[in-house]
Image (spheres, helix red, strand yellow):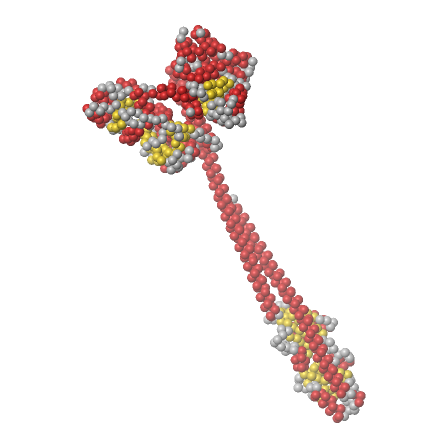
């Protein structure tokens, strides 16, 4: 599986990331590092412990990473979640669907990347 | 209110005037009275002194005369004489020597004998008896036979008399004139004249104009009835005083209105009274004079005070009136302002409600037609239109409130006029296309493309003007934008830029042109149905003012409007990249001569040999001509919209003459996506967008003639960062690695700080000048980017002002603002755009 195939499977923008990072190997290197990235875990743990400020930061980081690598689906859902969590609001029911979406996108993305590895 | 003040002032001033006059008149009369009293007192003193002197003099005269009579008696002592001729002759001789008028012997029983002179008739027999019996008294008066008034001295002496008896007294007579002369009772030299009267009022000595025999009757007749007490009163008083032998002093007024001072004192050794009279005519004159002088002075003082009061009053009145007028003006202004605001509010609420209603209504329709995707799509389109409009309104209102609260600020930046114009074209293009209007941009005499200016605000000005032009110009109308430069009167570092936006739309009335830049104004009625807040022009005006420029409007109703903005912009000091192209032979084809001229001169500056043609046929002729001479044009720039023969036709004809070898580039101010296929089919190689700035031409020509030369250039510049050190604060490992990768590629040495605190500590512990720049993520644990930037700036190190560039996924303007407030130099949005980052780094490090 090539990096481009992996990006297509995720629904991410390969052209965009190549425009920025230029080398296929480099993109692959970073994408694989995502497997070790702790941001998503931090997000889940923070939500569980009701630390909304930390949850926001985690979502924000996730968003930043995805943006850097042009991983559009997770970038979008993480953005929405980050906006909802901005200003340290308390956890409420309407955050759940956003969280679900992030979880879905993240899981799907990780699955695809694992295939690449 | 105005009248009330006037009334109050008038009343108070007239009261003041009356009070003033009353006080001064009273003062004058009191002063007059006082001086009159003082004169009286002085008069009294003088009179009593005078009287005393006269009394003394009288006494002396009487004593002298009495002693002379006694001497006469001693010469012929009564004891040693016998009555006879001898005694009579001796006495008569003595009397003659002594110049007595009369000498006689008298007895108390009435017997008498005249020895010398004529016989005498006593004025009063009773008085004579009284004098004879009283040893202290020795003077009386009488008349001689010839009616001469005599002063008679009565001295005790017992001479024998003719009838054999013995006389009791010798009486010697002197003419009364002697007494008068001696006393100087009369004379012009003295103000005072005196009478001597008897107790019953009969005159003894009479002087002045007195002719009556009795002084009392004189008083009654000469004293005016006007005298408050009446003449009788004085007579009574005088009689009483005489009875008691006291001095008497009184002030009288005679029939001629002249005041007289009367002073009476008893004379010793007689029953007589000395009456001194001083007519006050002279004194009265003096007093009158004094009084009139006083009155005059008082009047003058009064006048001065009144004048001063009047002046103060007038000044005060003027002041009040001025204040009142100002108050009225301020009130009017406030009223107008509030009216304008309330009008604005009502039109605003209407303007806001309209799109809002649209949104609500469309949402409802969409809800009802969820199953009909076409319908829903239509609704959504309309909703998005309305929302955009609403957003525009809200932006305007917010801008205005910023302006009104004075918070509008300028962010000076280096910008390219070319980019500004291009952005402008891109933004208004859709609107122009919708209304099928003719749009063109003309540039001329561009000295400097790069200037220092607030790009956002400049855009706002131009977009405002241009979108107004589009709004108020009917379909198929014409809108032109002109940009030209000239030397600035400010200094050499500035360039004067003229931006003109001209349309042939509905125009404006003269009255409206005057207030077009006022807040909340909009020409009413026919413009009502055209959207807008009426804030655009006032915002534009404020921005132009803040940039130190001017904006003018020239418009005629029905003919169109022209807005002319003049700004003195600072020339950017950045080195413009050297733009030199090979000396290609190039032909510009455009129906606008100005455009051809400016394009040709711009092309010549970048080394291209340019010629131009004003229409397709001329162009074809020139191309054919060059073709024949084997001096082919190497490039043709062709305007798309030309009258007579348009760009499409011309391109086809060119291809017929020279085949496919000659590159044809289309110049157009429009979005060329519509015409791209057609143009390419007709043989056009590419496009260059208007306006034809030097840089535009350079980039366009080099791109199409040599491929993308910029790519190679960038690779070269990337190598320039060898050996520079960057401290990168980024909490996420992955992001850090990506950034590191890119930066190391560009030759940087990069150190990682996992959060703000570490970043600050690392920097603090580094050697001076070790790091060349800091790249700062904003959202980090422990210490965020804002705090870290502040902490670094606060460090006491000479390199604490190194460039700090923020990197964040938040691209809100407040975030950018906050970054700058915290002391960071720049802000780049994630994902990291290498080119932009490099450009920034070059700016700070290159």
Residue drawn at 41 percent across, 11 percent down: A25
* Occupied quadrant, residue B661: top left
Residue at the limit of the structure toward the bottom, as seen here: B85
Q: Left or right: B481 with respect to B226?
A: left
Q: Position of residue A10 (x, y in %)?
A: 43, 10
Q: Left or right: B259 with respect to B427?
A: right
Q: Position of residue B583 (x, y in %)?
A: 28, 26
Any part of residue B361 in sight: no
Residue drawn at 65 percent across, 73 percent down: B277
Q: Nearer the viewer, residue B153 or B311?
A: B311
Q: Quadrant of the C terminus of chain B?
A: top left
**In the depicted structure, whether residue B263 falls above or below residue B61:** above
Q: Position of residue B656 (x, y in %)?
A: 21, 20
Q: Position of residue B334 (x, y in %)?
A: 48, 37
Q: Nearer the viewer, residue B109 or B319?
A: B319
**In the depicted structure, whether residue B795 falls above or below residue B133:** above
Residue drawn at 43 percent across, 23 percent down: B841
Residue drawn at 52 percent across, 26 percent down: B797
Residue at the limit of the structure toward the right, as seen here: B79
Any part of residue B662 in sight: yes
Residue at the limit of the structure toward the left, as seen here: B628
**In the depicted structure, whether residue B456 falls above or below residue B48:** above
Q: Left or right: B499 with respect to A60?
A: left
Q: Nearer the viewer, residue B265 or B143?
A: B265
């Amino acid at each position: 599986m090539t990096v481009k195939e992996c990006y297509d499977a995720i629904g991410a923008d390969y052209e965009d990331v190549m425009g920025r990072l230029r080398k296929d190997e480099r993109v692959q290197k970073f994408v694989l590092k995502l497997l070790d990235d702790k941001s998503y875990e931090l997000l889940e743990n923070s939500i569980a412990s009701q630390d909304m400020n930390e949850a926001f930061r985690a979502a924000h980081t996730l968003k930043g990473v995805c943006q850097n690598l042009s991983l559009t689906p997770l970038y979008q859902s993480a953005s929405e979640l980050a906006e909802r969590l901005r200003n340290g609001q308390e956890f409420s029911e309407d955050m759940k669907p956003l969280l679900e979406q992030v979880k879905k996108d993240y899981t799907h993305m990780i699955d695809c990347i694992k295939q690449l590895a | 209110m105005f009248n009330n003040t006037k009334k109050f002032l008038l009343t108070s001033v007239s009261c003041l005037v009356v009070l003033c006059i009353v006080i001064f008149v009273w003062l004058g009369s009191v002063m007059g009275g006082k001086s009159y009293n003082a004169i009286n007192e002085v008069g009294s003193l003088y009179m009593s002194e005078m009287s005393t002197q006269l009394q003394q003099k009288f006494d002396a005269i009487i004593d002298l005369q009495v002693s002379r009579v006694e001497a006469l008696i001693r010469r012929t002592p009564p004891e040693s004489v016998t009555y006879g001729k001898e005694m009579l002759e001796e006495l008569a001789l003595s009397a003659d020597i002594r110049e007595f008028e009369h000498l006689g012997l008298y007895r108390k029983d009435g017997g008498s004998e005249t020895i010398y002179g004529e016989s005498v008739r006593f004025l009063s027999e009773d008085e004579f008896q009284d004098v004879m019996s009283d040893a202290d008294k020795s003077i009386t008066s009488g008349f001689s036979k010839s009616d001469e008034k005599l002063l008679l001295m009565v001295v005790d002496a017992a001479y024998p008399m003719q009838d054999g008896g013995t006389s009791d007294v010798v009486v010697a007579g002197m003419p009364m004139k002697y007494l008068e002369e001696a006393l100087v009772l009369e004379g012009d030299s003295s103000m005072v004249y005196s009478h001597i009267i008897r107790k019953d009022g009969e005159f003894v000595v009479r002087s002045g104009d007195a002719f009556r025999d009795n002084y009392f009757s004189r008083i009654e007749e000469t004293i005016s009835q006007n005298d408050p007490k009446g003449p009788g009163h004085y007579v009574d008083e005088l009689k009483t005083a005489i009875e008691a032998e006291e001095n008497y002093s009184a002030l009288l007024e005679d029939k001629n209105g002249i005041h007289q001072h009367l002073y009476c004192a008893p004379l010793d050794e007689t029953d007589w009274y000395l009456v001194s009279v001083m007519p006050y005519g002279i004194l009265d004159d003096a007093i009158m004079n004094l009084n009139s002088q006083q009155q005059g002075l008082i009047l003058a003082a009064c006048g001065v005070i009144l004048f001063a009061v009047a002046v103060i009053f007038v000044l005060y009145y003027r002041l009040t009136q001025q204040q009142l007028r100002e108050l009225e003006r301020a009130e009017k202004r406030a009223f107008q302002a509030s009216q304008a605001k309330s009008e604005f509010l009502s039109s605003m609420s209407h303007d806001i409600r309209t799109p809002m209603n649209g949104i609500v209504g469309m949402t409802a329709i969409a809800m009802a037609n969820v199953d009909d995707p076409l319908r829903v799509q239509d609704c959504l389109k309309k909703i998005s239109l309305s929302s955009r409009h609403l957003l525009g309104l809200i932006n305007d209102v917010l801008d205005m409130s910023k302006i009104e609260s004075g918070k509008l600020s300028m962010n000076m930046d280096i910008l390219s006029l070319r980019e500004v114009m291009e952005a402008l074209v891109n933004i208004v293009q859709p609107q122009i296309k919708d209304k099928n209007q003719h749009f063109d941009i003309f540039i001329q005499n561009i000295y400097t493309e790069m200037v220092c200016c607030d790009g956002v605000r400049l855009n706002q000005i131009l977009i405002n003007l241009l979108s107004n032009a589009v709004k108020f110009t009917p379909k198929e109308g014409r809108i032109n934008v002109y940009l030209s430069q000239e030397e600035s009167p400010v200094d050499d570092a500035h360039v004067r830029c003229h931006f003109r936006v001209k349309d042939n739309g509905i125009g404006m009335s003269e009255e409206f042109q005057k207030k077009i830049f006022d807040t909340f104004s909009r020409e009413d009625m026919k413009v009502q149905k055209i959207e807008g807040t009426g804030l655009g022009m006032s915002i534009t005006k404020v921005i132009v003012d803040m940039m130190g420029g001017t904006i003018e409007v020239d418009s005629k109703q029905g003919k169109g409007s022209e807005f002319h903005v003049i700004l003195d912009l600072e020339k950017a000091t950045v080195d413009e990249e050297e733009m030199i192209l090979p000396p290609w032979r190039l032909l510009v084809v455009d129906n606008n001569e100005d455009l051809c001229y400016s394009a040709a001169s711009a092309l010549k500056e970048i080394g291209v040999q340019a010629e131009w043609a004003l229409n397709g046929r001329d162009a074809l002729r020139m191309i054919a001509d060059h073709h024949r001479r084997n001096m082919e044009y190497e490039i043709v720039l062709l305007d798309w919209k030309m009258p007579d023969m348009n760009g499409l036709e011309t391109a086809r004809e060119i291809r017929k003459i020279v085949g496919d070898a000659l590159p044809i580039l289309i110049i157009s101010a429009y979005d060329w996506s519509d015409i791209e296929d057609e143009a390419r089919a007709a043989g056009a190689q590419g496009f260059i967008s208007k306006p034809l700035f030097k840089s535009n031409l350079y980039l366009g020509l080099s791109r199409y003639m040599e491929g993308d030369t910029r790519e190679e250039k960038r690779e070269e510049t990337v190598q320039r960062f060898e050996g520079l050190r960057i401290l990168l604060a980024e909490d996420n490992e992955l992001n850090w690695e990506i950034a590191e990768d890119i930066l190391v590629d560009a030759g940087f040495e990069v150190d990682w700080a996992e959060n703000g605190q570490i970043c600050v500590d690392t920097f603090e512990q580094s050697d001076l000048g070790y790091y060349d720049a800091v790249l700062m993520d904003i959202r980090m644990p422990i210490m965020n980017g804002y705090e870290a930037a502040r902490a670094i700036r606060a460090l006491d190190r000479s390199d604490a002002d190194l460039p700090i560039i923020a990197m964040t996924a938040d691209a809100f303007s407040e975030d950018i603002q906050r970054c700058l407030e915290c002391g960071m130099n720049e802000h780049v949005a994630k994902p990291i755009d290498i080119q932009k980052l490099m450009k920034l780094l070059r700016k700070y490090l290159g």
